[in-house]
Amino acid sequence: MKTKILVIVLCIPLIFLVACSTDSQISNDVNATTKESNDYAREIAWDFIKEMAWDDLAKEEWQSAKVTKMIADDDHQFLGKSYKDNYEGKEVLLVSFEGTPSILIDPNTNKVIGYKSLENPPVKGYIVDKSKDEVWVISEIQKEEIVGKSEKELYALVMSEKYHGKGYMVDTKDIDKETVSSLQVGQKVSVNYDVFGNSAPLHAHATNIKIVKE
């Protein structure tokens, strides 16, 4: 009887060690799977960053991006209405790169569904040129310098040493058509934007444009 008790007592630590070892192995497997999944999410997000030509804005290597779970909401830009309807209010992965928009990914399919824009202070200035999808806005220029000038004279002014390379070349493709059609050279505007490229003038993606009444 004493021998059986001794055997049981000696086996208890072994059972405990085996259980701990199994739990540790399960934990390691889960951590490894999570890391592999996060690495894949970073890679998918970085491919989208490059596709949008935002990679020049990144301040760190893509491998250092932070991956977190969160609920998608109205603060995010979805890639289309179907994505908004399917994912708003649901848990998604947010891959955050320093210096670029953060990317939303479906955790089940690993597909990009949208992004969270960077927040920048609005730019105020005068429109000195307009094309189909862009307006050139310069903050430094004065209204008196624009009024009464012909298109040729204004172009000569903004290409002069004083203003050459100044301001923002604002992409208006995501601004509603009615607002874009109302924009005219010589108007003062306030532009909200999320990303910009390092160029002269700076190329910026507009999220909102308002005409400033003077």
Image (cartoon, grey):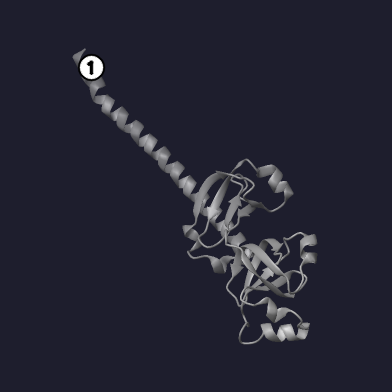
Q: Nearer the viewer, residue 87 or 17?
A: 87
Query: What is the secondary structure assignment of the residue under circle 1?
Result: helix
Q: Point out residue 81 in the picture as x, y percentages from the top left corner.
A: 73, 49
Q: Nearer the viewer, residue 199 or 14?
A: 199
Quadrant location of the N terminus in the rendered image: top left
Disc 1: CA contacts within 10 A as few (<14), some (14-19) or many (>=20): few
Quadrant location of the C terminus in the rendered image: bottom right
Residue at point 49% right, 65% down? 59
Question: In this image, 45 relative to 32: left or right?
Answer: right
The vertical placement of 155 against 75, above or below, is below
Q: Point out residue 114 in the picture as x, y percentages from the top left corner.
A: 64, 53
Pick out the residue farthest to the top: 1
Which residue matches tag 1?
A: 5
The vertical placement of 197 against 69, above or below, is below
Q: Quadrant of residue 139?
A: bottom right
Q: Nearer the viewer, residue 8 or 82?
A: 82
User: Is residue 208 visible to the viewer in this orientation of the structure?
Assistant: yes
Q: Quadrant of residue 170?
A: bottom right
Q: Point out residue 174 in the picture as x, y percentages from the top left corner.
A: 72, 60
Residue at point 39% right, 39% down? 25
User: Is residue 112 visible to the viewer in this orientation of the structure?
Assistant: no
Pick out the residue farthest to the left: 2
Say what amino acid the circle numbered 1 marks: Ile
Q: Point out residue 56 in the picture as x, y percentages from the top left corner.
A: 56, 69
- Number of labelled discs? 1
